[in-house]
Image (cartoon, helix red, strand yellow):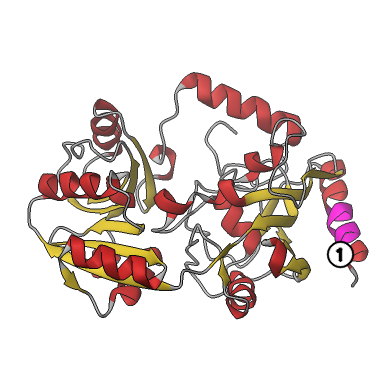
Amino acid sequence: MNDGDLTADIQGRIQQAAASATPLRIVGGNSKAFYGEDCSATAVLDMAGHSGFIDYEPSELVITARAGTRLRDIETLLDSHGQMLAFEPPYFGEQATLGGTMACGFSGPRRPFAGAGRDFMLGCKIVNGYGEVLSFGGQVMKNVAGFDVSRLMIGALGTLGVLLEISLRVLPKPESEATLIYAMADEQQAIKRMNRFSGQPWPLSALAYDGQLLSLRLSGAESAVQAAARQLGGDFDELGEDFWLALREQNLAFFEDDDTLWRISMAPSAASPAVFGTRLLDWGGALRWLKTDQPAKVVHEACEAVGGYAEAFRGGEKHDRIRLKPEIAALQSRIRAAFDPHGLFNPGFCRDR
């Protein structure tokens, strides 16, 4: 099918679903099906076939692709031109698609130093709950046309509409990278060290702490990376690239068991929540992974007490995955009603629906 036929086919299916009040479960590579709450829709809208590149001009640092395009294919193309998706999105499976990646809003270890996925979103085309094809944003780096609706799609889990096309800003790959490691067993000491590193003009691109080792990645011109490494000390980690990939894809030993895995966002300088369990710190301390068998209520309250926000990333009771303030839940519900008044898209993925 050509692009017009692909879009018309998806649009037609959504219009039929609206007419028959049939909710749809949007599926791309299905690599992130573990995330979110339980979707109650049984009819599947398969987006994997809606794939391919629409526009890519390396000199413009912009790529536009259909939502079903595999993330692997996108990064292979970018790599051939010395470019990358700077927010370092995790795959969680070889069939991961661009649409699913942006709908979940995940970013990897580079996120605090390069930006999140929404920071690189230039525009998108969607089909809303009325079956209308809508375009937001564009393919330019500066867009001042009004409220940036395209960024609402990031992290919305498909509940605002079906992503058809996405335009992203890309960046050149760094000339050189090096990973330094520092042995330390005290978490608070590691937090202070990471905050001290982050407050200086080093060419940092990742900072993590696993309870034993603090890992620091430098990225940039070779001379700058080497100069920084000499001043920062520490030991060179020859397997540093493998470590950051394993952290991004949650293939480290920390992630291997079946304990409930919590994702906690908080100030990087704050002490971790007083919850029994094991932790791994990423994003220089702004993202903390917690494994615990403590009840969800205990985790949420402990995180709120230190100004953090927790969500059950894997495992646990789905209905206790997140805890939203009533005003935030009401706002989200109103936004979804505007885009999808019939509740067609991924019903149940978010609690207020």
In depth, the one of 312 and 265 nearer the eye is: 265
Q: Is residue 70 visible to the viewer in this orientation of the structure?
A: yes
Q: Which residues are magenta?
A: 6-13
Residue 39 percent coordinates (x, y): 58, 48
Label 1 crowd bin: few (<14), some (14–19), many (20+), radius 10 Å = some
Q: Residue at x 63, y 62 (%)?
A: 98
Rendered-image quadrant of the N terminus: bottom right
Q: Nearer the viewer, residue 283 or 299?
A: 283
Is 11 inside the magenta-drawn segment?
yes
| Left or right: 48, with 245 as reference point | right
Prevailing secondary structure of the magenta residues: helix
Quickly name the residue at label 1: 6
Residue at the (43%, 44%) spot, across then down: 318
**Disc 1 on helix, strand or loop?**
helix
**Residue 247 shows up from this direction:** no
Is 100 included in the stretch rendered in magenta? Answer: no
| Residue farthest to the left, as pictured | 185
> Looking at the picture, which amino acid does disc 1 mark?
Leu
Q: Whole-percent x and y of residue 291?
A: 24, 52
User: Residue, x 20% and y 60% (percent of image)?
Assistant: 210
The answer to which quarter of the image holds residue 229 is bottom left
Residue 145, position as x, y percentages in the image: 77, 34
